[in-house]
Image (cartoon, coloured by chain):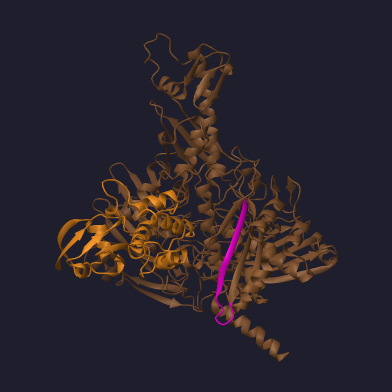
Chain colours: A orange, B brown
Amino acid sequence: MVTTNIKVNGKKISKEISDNTLLSDFLRDTLALTGTHVGCDTSQCGACTVHLNGNSIKSCTILVADCDGSEITTIEGLATNGKMHPMQEAFKKNHGLQCGFCTPGMVMSAVDLLQKNKNPNEKEIRDWLEGNICRCTGYQNIVAAVKDASTKM
Amino acid sequence: MTSLVGSRVERKEDKKFLTGKGRYTSDINLVHQTYACFVRSPHARAKIVKIDIEKALKAPGVVKVFTGDDIAKEKIGGLIAGWKIVSQDGKDMKVPDHPPLAKSSVNYVGDHVAVVIAETLENAKNAADLVNVSYKAMKAIVDPGESMDSDEIYEGIEQNLCFDFVLGDKGKTDDAFSSADKVIELDLRNNRLIPNAMEPRACIGDYNSSTDDLTLYTTSQNPHLSRLVLSAFGGIHPEHKFRVVAPDVGGGFGSKIYAYAEDAVVAWASKKIERPIKWVAERSESFLSDCHGRDHITNVKLALDKDNKITGLKVNTIANIGAYASLFSTVTPTYLYAPLILGVYDIPTAFCNVKAVFTNTAPVDAYRGAGRPEATYLIERIISKAAKEVGMDQAEFRKNNFINKFPHQQCLVHNIDSGDYRAHLDKALEISDYKNFKNRKSESATKGKLRGIGFSTYLEACGIAPSAVVMSIGAGVGLWESAEVRFNATGNVSVFTGAHSHGQGHATTFAQIVGDKLGVAIENIDVIHGDTDKGPFGMGTYGSRSLAVGGSAIAKACDKIIEKGKKVAAHMLEGKAEDVDFKEGDFILKNSNKKKTIGEIAFACYLPGQYGEVKSPLPEGIEPGLKETSFYDPVNFSFPAGTHICEVEVDQDSGETKVVKYTAVDDFGTIINPMIVEGQVHGGLAQGIGQALYENSHYDKSGQLTTASYMDYTMPRADNFPHFKIDYTTTPATSNPLGSKGCGEAGAIAAPPAVMNAVIDAIETEVSMPATAEKVWKKIKEKHSKKEAA
């Protein structure tokens, strides 16, 4: 067991955690932040994407113990005072989601793209989202949503 | 009032998903819950000699271990195939038992041998490793093409043949071929796919012994059907004490239609241990044990006369059923496949033979399109080959053979009510800038790329399944749909549907229908589904049926509400029911300025004494309350059709194929929400292009699945696609009150032949799906070396 101090969605958390606990399991099982989804065993699907110190990472592939002293943002921490983030709004407006399972990871990944590239073109958006698999949308409306959000962020 | 139907209404269900508040089965945790881990067969085919659970039982946290013997002792029934198929010799199909936990043999890698139930998931997984199973491994039968010539997997199922199905007039078709001017022939393989909904399957069984209530939370596209199967055939629990809940479900594509072994075991075992049991599939388990799709080996022949009119079609198919006959596995390669081989063409005679065989692979069942992609692939591929061989333009050859008059009785089964195939072909030619393709081809050539163009003018039969039609061709069960429209006293509306949304946006589309019908604001309409304790029995969502069948049921229930409302309004307005008109939420007495809003009527129906009037607002003989139910069984299938045109560029040096241009013009009949429909088309295209270029489920000779992770099974990614150009033509369906035909499967049905026709056009040689870089590169090399040798 290790004591881990992290900040999740702005809230300080100090917990005794077994040293093999994955961040995705910790978020879902310990903190009940079930918006972070687990869709594969191999770090491919990206449904578990969260921000670690502002950068998107796959939370299924990092131990909580390795996050000591870090700041985590999950999909639940994106809206402010009940108002959805412009990326969330853009996904809604552009029908960038269907079943919703990949959506939290997709949104977190897209937010990070715009942090790093304010005005990406279609190819840059498609290349960036290569690590997030969606089986429903065919990606077209996700790309449209990210473009739309880039004009509002 | 602007019409909701036809508008791009943003989805009511989006916010919960976007803010991480969706509630999927794996998000649910119950008090005192245990965790299940399944012990799965590492062999494709083996006899079970002995299962030793002693060590596992003693492992930390283990609550119980069950094997097939435990289930057999309780006479729990196996999983079933829903449709009986009769072979051409008049004998019924043959299916093996499919026990939820194996009895004496295992028949595919991933088959269920035992279940370990423990206090934590880690405990369950660790103990599962301690279950010691002795197997006597046998030679696996993997290739469907070799199955009939191999030894019997199941005693009594000769040649491993499930059924030998025929459709059509063999004699007449043989005659057409003997008098044909030309015969075109193709051998095709429709590759095996894994549906890969992003949410892995999961279930929780929860039994309350004090009330004898059993609840199963599960990732299902049709909770009522699952309850029926587990109750009536599994004997797991009486239907009235059995609640099945399918909460938010993360995609299905067919793979979540069936009640699986895990559902049966978890539900049954929770009764035994009287504690909730949760199981969530790892992705590798999904690969191994979700039903796979497609997997046909087909020979197709087309007969032409001297005017290049089609005079006959012959199809011989071997369909892989996998190790067991899953719920829809027998209807998919028969009734959903054989009638569709004719496509959109006026073909006077056809004959189709389907031999369905067992192999030591995961069960194969319906996957987005289910039978129709396989049919469309063969007809659209051979049509393109025929056009090339006779030297006709692809569009012209098609037009020369299109069905032009409706209704059209096809020579096999379907009576197509409406369509205009030239209209969507012409529109697609325009949008795709077909006339300038040659210029684009030359441009690509200057970059060292081979450019090809491919057509697919497809036909679907959707809105499955009108009882009258399917029963006329021998299917035992038709598939209607139910709806209940319930006004609350305060004027808002709860709509219960037997359909299930797992991405399709029913909460919005259905609310649009009800909003227009009843004149109620969309925010005051709630659509409820996915819980057998709430709505009436329904058949669920698959086969592009939710709108055409489920939506029609909702519309019918709304009509009944209006009918009753008129009687109440007439009484309150002191007129006659036949003199009351209903428009945009108001009941208006003809030739007067007297009216009642539908909200007022609902209030009066529930609280008739509230006006302080002595006389009840309800006429004599009218019951209080305002809710109506409809069970809708359509009179016919609906027939979406369309033209898809694909352009690819092939890199000669690497063999890599890229879809560079894709145009889809579809006729879905009446469209309720164009935004949602576009999303359905995009998603279908991604899966169809995925089948053509990337995806393949591969077993090695010993029956090990070599594509059991996302590192081996190529899921299409955002950077695999161009921007799709989507448009519509509209001929409303006449078989349902909405005029809708269905849109969910079109992309997956139309795209594979469009893409493959383009690839073959580019490299000028046959190649099978998926046309991976390696395969295409080899084909290009082969062609060059043949040329050099010549």
Q: Which quarter of the picture shows residue B383? A: bottom right
Residue B525 location, x and y as percent?
43, 35
Number of callouts in the render? Answer: 0
Of B782 and B164, nearer the camera is B782
Of B552 and B657, nearer the camera is B657
Q: Which residues are magenta?
A: B651-666
Residue B648 location, x and y as percent?
60, 69
Residue B357 location, x and y as percent?
59, 67
Residue under the image location 22 percent in, 67 percent down: A64
Q: Which quarter of the picture shows residue B583? A: top right
From the image, give the main secondary structure of the stretch colored magenta. strand
Asked if the stretch drawn in magenta spans residue B662, the answer is yes
Please give left or right for residue A117 compared with residue B561 in the image. Answer: left
Residue under the image location 58 percent in, 73 percent down: B771
In this rendering, is residue B747 above or below B601?
below
Q: Can residue B65 be seen in this snapshot?
A: no
In this rendering, is residue B69 above or below B3?
below
Residue under the image location 29 percent in, 67 percent down: B125
Residue B157 location, x and y as percent?
58, 66
Of B86 and B663, nearer the camera is B663
Asked if the stretch drawn in magenta spans residue B746, the answer is no
In this rendering, is residue B115 above or below B418?
below
Which quadrant is the C terminus of chain B positioned in? Answer: bottom right
Q: Can residue B362 be seen in this snapshot?
A: yes
Residue closest to the far top: B614
Please give left or right for residue B345 compared with residue A66 in the image. Answer: right
Q: Which quarter of the picture shows residue B781? A: bottom right
Residue closest to the far bottom: B789
